[in-house]
Image (tube, rainbow, N blue to C red):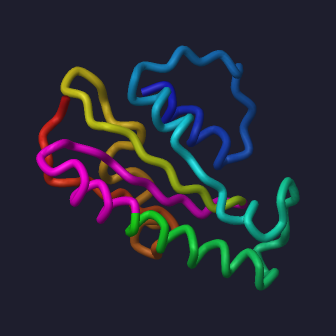
Amino acid sequence: MASERLFRASRSGRAHSGHWEPDRTGAEAFENHLHPLDLFTPGLHVRMSDPRFRAAEQLGQAIAHSWYSGLVRVFPGQGFRVYYARGDNPTVRLHRVYRAEAPWLADGSFPQEAASGQVLILTTPGRAA
């Protein structure tokens, strides 16, 4: 999926064309995201060793779990995916699950990062739209 290729390119530092025509999944994942670090240092990046970065990591993981729980409660039976990715700027995002579209980030992507908690993929038990 295009958004996963862009994610992988940005995580590796490789340039990409910037051309992207998102499907509903990609558009929602792009629009429905938050950078917890902006709550500590709006518009600035800090080193991973900075205590604000660690706080943003913990907050991002908590927000991801909170969004997941809220979606399960408020939209029972509907499928959503919530993501947390640490990278150099922790990010939380979500999208609805659509039958004819691949998820923004496939299960099993970034297995080492997932094992260490740097990437979370949370899927609600509901059905696809």
120 over 100 or under it: above or below: below
In which quarter of the view is residue 7 placed? top right
Q: How many marks?
A: 0
- Residue closer to the observer: 117 or 126: 126
Residue in the picture at 48% in, 36% down: 4
Quadrant in which the N terminus appears: top left
Q: Position of residue 13 (x, y in %)?
A: 73, 45
Q: Nearer the viewer, residue 26 or 115?
A: 26
**Which of the pair 28/7 is nearer the observer?**
28
Residue shown at the point (21%, 43%) measured from the top left = 79
Identify whether 77 is placed above or below 36. above
Q: Is residue 42 magenta?
A: no
Q: Quadrant of the C terminus?
A: top left
48 or 27, nearer to the observer: 27
Residue farthest toward the bottom in the current orientation of the protein? 51
Q: Is residue 2 above or below residue 55?
A: above
- Quick one: which residue is furthest to the front in this view? 74
Q: Residue at x 55, y 35 (%)?
A: 30
Residue 123, given in percent of the width and then of the height, sits at: 26, 53
Q: Is residue 48 left or right of residue 5?
A: right
Q: Which residues are magenta?
A: 67-88
Whether residue 120 sits left or right of residue 85 in the image: it is: left
- Residue, x 87% and y 59% (percent of image)? 44
Picture coordinates of residue 53, whole percent (x, y):
73, 75
Query: Does the magenta portion include 84?
Result: yes
Residue 69, located in which quarter of the rendered image? Answer: bottom left
